[in-house]
Image (cartoon, rainbow, N blue to C red):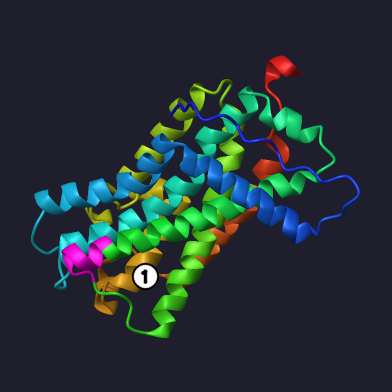
Amino acid sequence: MTTTTKPATPVTATRGRSPRAGALALRQGRLEITQFLRSRESVVFTMGFPIIMILIFASIFHGTIGGGVRFTQYFITGMIATGLMTVSFQNLGIWIPIERDRGVLKRYRGTPMPKWVWFAGKVIMVVAIGIAETALLLAVAVALFDLDLPGTAAKWFTFGWVAVLGVTACTLCGIAISSLARTARSGSAVVTPVALVLQFISGVFFVFTDLPTWMQQVAALFPLKWMCQGLRSVFLPESFGAQEPGDSFELGRVALVLALWCVIGVVLCLTTFRWTTKRDG
């Protein structure tokens, strides 16, 4: 994905002042959000893609998939997970190589600002856009496809921790995979195929148990499958858990795998992240 938006200048400490760490992070977060919103291509792709896919698939597929659950209900839960992955993993995996290639990260590293502030700004942007996108998807699903929102505090709590762990894991993995792109233009070529394959094998576009066994096993190695499964426990009836591969929603395993991917993501970021391109040294 390309854009003509001019890279924003990194936040730097004002001489004679010592802003608090939290204020620096919030300022960087606002800068990242502003830069995202100025890129119409990013906004349309990130916010619009899940909604377009919901409208297309809901118009094509009808009927139930068992237990009184409509395919539309099943598909929407997967698209919510996909939306969270898009704003974190895919968006960061594409944008960071652009900033690296343009020298934004190199200039930032040369400022007196702590490096963690840059990462905090990315996290704040992901959280803010993720919340907005999820709210938009839920509004469309409720208004057009009669999606039932969670009726208990326990289900909303489950929705919260699945989303938090999933976004955290995808954000860290997005930062890590950004180092694989050698140039700004190759970021999309590296990240987009990975994201699309994960969507097809993780129970987003198709009922997960209808996929070949080997494909289910491969999907179980990655976060998206577990995000979808956790969200199904929130939006689908309890009885539908019997149709999952483990005969239940396995929320304990969902939490364990997503937490493990958070740890893996931290390790990958610490060992692979680069502030400059290879030609810069």
Q: Residue visible at 61% across and 30% down?
A: 99
Residue farthest along the right direction in this orientation: 16
Residue farthest along the top direction in this orientation: 279
Task: Name the foreground residue: 26 vs 211.
Answer: 26
Q: Amino acid at mark 1?
A: Phe
Vertical placement of residue 172 versus 151, above or below: above
- Residue 62 seen by the camera: yes
Q: Residue visible at 47% across and 77% down?
A: 157
Task: Report the quarter where the N terminus lies.
Answer: top left
Task: Name the foreground residue: 131 vs 56.
Answer: 131
Q: Residues within 10 Å of mark 1 (few under 14, many from 20)?
A: many
Vertical placement of residue 141 versus 52, above or below: below
219 left or right of 115 in image? left
Task: Name the foreground residue: 98 vs 112.
Answer: 112
Q: Residue visible at 45% across and 61% down?
A: 131
What is the chief secondary structure element of the magenta stretch? helix
Q: Position of residue 161 (x, y in %)?
A: 51, 69
Task: Label 1: state its secondary structure.
Answer: loop
Residue 208, image quadrant: bottom left
Task: Name the foreground residue: 63 vs 91.
Answer: 91
Residue 277, image quadrant: top right
- Residue 248 seen by the camera: no
The boundaries of the magenta stretch are 140-147
Q: Position of residue 192 (x, y in %)?
A: 41, 34
Q: Position of residue 144 (x, y in %)?
A: 17, 63
**Mark 1, residue position:** 249
Residue 281, image quadrant: top right
Membership of 155 in magenta stretch: no
Q: Residue visible at 48% across and 39% down?
A: 38
Membership of 146 in magenta stretch: yes
